[in-house]
Image (spheres, rainbow, N blue to C red):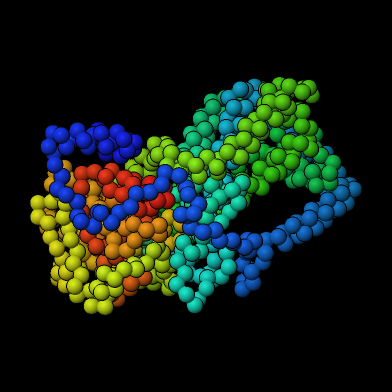
């Protein structure tokens, strides 16, 4: 059985397998004593245990040094619209424009027409697309609310963002990325709670996969029939006709409509951009935000850095929102019965057959909209398990790539966001006050030769330095130079037994809900060249904030998997009996996946 399918199983089955394994005496050694400090976790979101709400602000865009509230877009947009109507109406009185509109009536005359109407598969795919988009957009906004700032540069230095819906970063206190996350209303985000990115990501990625499959089937079907001719302009006169249609719409005297066989130039271009530009751009800019993918694409990954990809992803999202709004309005104002007959009944007449089906479809989307957040909160663990089943394994496949991207000294970020729950124990304070002279790293479990290392021992080993990008699940990234011991050198010393599958990292610090922070990695991840136990950051000993005395760097995973303040490393065959069994603290408590290369 593959590791993936094994770990996708329910806890009950896994535990039964363990009992079986134990009964045939494949005994594991007892866990490191620190395992007793792990806590179990709830299977639903309990609001009193969750990060308390925090309000954001109305989104702002930075122009130069000024921040402009986006609500100004409403009066500004209305003024532009009124002006546009006035200009278009005056233009239409000019003889030259009248001649232009006669030559180019809106529909490209040279364009071939589609004879096969709106087949059932087109109607179905159109509905599915709308249904999926609702989840994707809402969960996407939820993900953005976990780091409500957008940048073009890779470093995420406060003040360099061009868009935000959060106050400026306070300078007089430690301000972690988690502090920075804001609450969304439950009808907007999924599930609408602050820092619910773990759950939102399962929705976003699972439905993305369905949406991509729907899109691929759509591409195949339109190009194997004549339907592609609706969307792809094949004659140059699409451009003057698009301009003509724009003037006619703007003058409120709409162009003739032959939507059954041929769209006008403006429709054609906007559909083409949506299907063949915005959709691929979204997929591409989405994938480039992944550490495993970005770190594997060489110049493409480092050139189009994560923040640029994230900003592009946001711009393509804006295109989709504007398209959906304009498309929805047009469906109503250009003949609701005709239009819904086309797309919901596949007939060309002015009767009422399509309209009720349209209403039913909208009701289905409305119901799903209403149910998504409460169901996610109530059945959070189920959402996590289902997500893992649907996309977890695909995401996991990218772990197979060995990360290679390294940057140079100039790329080191002036600001590196801190994150997580800081150590707060007498034990840690004692170690810190002794400058970690008494610190000991225990490495044990299913190994031939368990070892204990002091910081001096680790510093005496081969040192590796690397300048890499940190990808936090919340959306920020940062570049730093890390120095430490290659994990493969530790592995060579302790020699894991053949049945070993995972390395568990236990922290000296607790997680946000209490119970010890820990995380589990596949052994193959630990053998990558860029996986190190870092004791230095940017040429200086690691600070307390960033994980002193020792933290993990594993460059093809998201940041939360890189345990800071490491206390012990244990090699195991299975992790179902640790904590809540999900493979790490945030996996247990915040419903993340334990394999997070995307
Ligand atoms: N012990 C412990 N390790 C942790 C965390 C934590 O809360 N506790 N947070 C993780 C998260 S979410 C991130 S993004 C990185 C942040 O590392 P940094 O503070 O150096 O930026 O540490 C990870 N390691
Ligand atoms: Mo993170």
Task: Tell me: residue 31, above or below residue 210.
Answer: below
Residue lying at 64% horizontally and 72% vertically, measured from the top left: 66
Horizontal side of 428 relative to 224 (left or right) equals left
Can the viewer see residue 592?
no
- Identify which residue, 307 or 534, lies in the foreground: 534
Query: Residue 172 vs residue 24: left or right?
Result: right
Q: Position of residue 206 (x, y in %)?
A: 46, 39
**Picture residue at 34% right of the left edge, 49% below the top:** 40
Q: How many marks?
A: 0
x, y (%) of residue 505? 26, 56
Direction from residue 545 to residue 56 in the image, left or right: right
The answer, for residue 500, to whether it is visible in the render is yes
Residue placed most toward the observer, 346 or 87: 346
Name the residue at 59% across, 27% down: 124
Location of residue 358 with respect to 176 vertically, above or below? above
Q: Quadrant of residue 406?
A: bottom left
Q: Where's residue 392, x and y in %?
A: 38, 41
Name the foreground residue: 37 vs 26.
37
User: Looking at the figure, which quarter contains the N terminus?
Assistant: top left
| Residue 18 picture quarter | top left
Outermost residue, left side:
448
Q: Where 161 sits versus 84, above or below?
A: below
User: Which residue is rendered at x = 24% and y = 62% of the image?
Assistant: 567
**In the rendered image of this protein, does residue 325 appear above or below residue 357?**
below
Seen from the viewer's position, the closer of residues 520 and 120 is 520
Q: Position of residue 564 (x, y in %)?
A: 31, 63
Which picture quadrant has residue 577? Answer: top left
């Amino acid at each position: 059985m593959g590791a993936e399918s094994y770990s996708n199983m329910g806890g009950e089955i896994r535990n039964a397998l363990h009992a079986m394994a134990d009964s045939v005496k494949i005994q594991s050694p007892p866990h490191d004593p620190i395992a007793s400090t792990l806590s179990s976790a709830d299977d639903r979101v309990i609001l009193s245990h969750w990060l308390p709400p925090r309000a954001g602000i109305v989104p702002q865009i930075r122009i130069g040094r000024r921040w402009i509230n986006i609500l100004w877009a409403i009066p500004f947009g209305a003024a532009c619209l009124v002006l546009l109507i006035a200009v278009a109406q005056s233009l239409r009185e000019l003889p030259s424009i009248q001649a232009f509109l006669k030559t180019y009536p809106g529909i490209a005359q040279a364009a071939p027409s589609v004879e096969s109407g709106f087949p059932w598969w087109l109607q179905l795919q159109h509905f599915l697309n709308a249904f999926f988009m609702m989840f994707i957009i809402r969960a996407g906004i939820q993900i953005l609310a976990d780091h409500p700032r957008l940048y073009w540069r890779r470093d995420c230095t406060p003040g360099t963002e061009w868009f935000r819906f959060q106050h400026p970063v306070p300078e007089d206190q430690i301000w972690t990325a988690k502090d920075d996350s804001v609450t969304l209303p439950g009808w907007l985000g999924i599930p609408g709670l602050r820092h619910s990115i773990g759950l939102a990501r399962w929705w976003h990625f699972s439905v993305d996969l369905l949406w991509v499959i729907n899109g691929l089937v759509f591409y195949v079907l339109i190009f194997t029939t004549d339907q592609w001719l609706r969307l792809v302009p094949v004659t140059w006169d699409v451009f003057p006709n698009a301009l003509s249609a724009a003037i006619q719409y703007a003058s409120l005297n709409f162009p003739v409509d032959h939507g059954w066989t041929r769209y006008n130039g403006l429709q054609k271009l906007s559909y083409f951009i949506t299907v063949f530009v915005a959709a691929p751009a979204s997929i591409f800019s989405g994938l480039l935000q992944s550490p495993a993918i970005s770190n594997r694409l060489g110049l493409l990954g480092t050139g189009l850095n994560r923040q640029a990809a994230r900003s592009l992803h946001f711009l393509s999202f804006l295109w989709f929102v504007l398209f959906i709004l304009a498309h929805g309005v047009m469906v109503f104002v250009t003949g609701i019965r005709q239009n819904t007959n086309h797309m919901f009944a596949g007939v060309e007449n002015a009767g009422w057959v399509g309209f009720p089906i349209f209403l039913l479809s909208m009701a289905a989307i409305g119901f799903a909209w209403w149910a998504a957040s409460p169901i996610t909160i109530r059945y959070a663990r189920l959402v996590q398990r289902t997500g893992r089943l649907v996309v977890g394994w695909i995401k996991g496949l990218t772990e197979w790539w060995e990360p290679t991207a390294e940057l140079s000294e100039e790329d080191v970020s002036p600001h590196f966001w801190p994150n997580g729950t800081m150590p707060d124990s007498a034990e840690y304070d004692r170690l810190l006050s002794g400058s970690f002279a008494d610190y000991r790293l225990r490495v044990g479990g299913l190994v031939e030769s368990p070892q204990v290392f002091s910081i001096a021992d680790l510093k005496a080993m081969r040192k590796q330095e690397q300048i890499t990008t940190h990808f936090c699940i919340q959306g920020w990234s940062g570049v730093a130079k890390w120095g430490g011991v290659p994990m493969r050198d530790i592995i060579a010393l302790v020699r894991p037994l053949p049945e070993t599958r995972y390395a568990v990292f236990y922290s000296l610090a607790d997680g946000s809900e209490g119970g010890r922070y820990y995380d589990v990695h596949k052994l193959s991840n630990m053998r990558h060249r860029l996986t190190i136990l870092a004791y230095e950051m940017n040429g200086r000993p690691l600070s307390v904030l960033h994980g002193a005395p020792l933290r993990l760097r594993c460059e093809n995973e998201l940041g939360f998997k890189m345990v800071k303040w490491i206390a012990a490393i244990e090699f195991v065959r299975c992790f179902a009996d640790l904590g809540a069994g999900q493979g790490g603290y945030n996996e247990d408590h915040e419903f993340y996946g334990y394999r997070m290369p995307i």
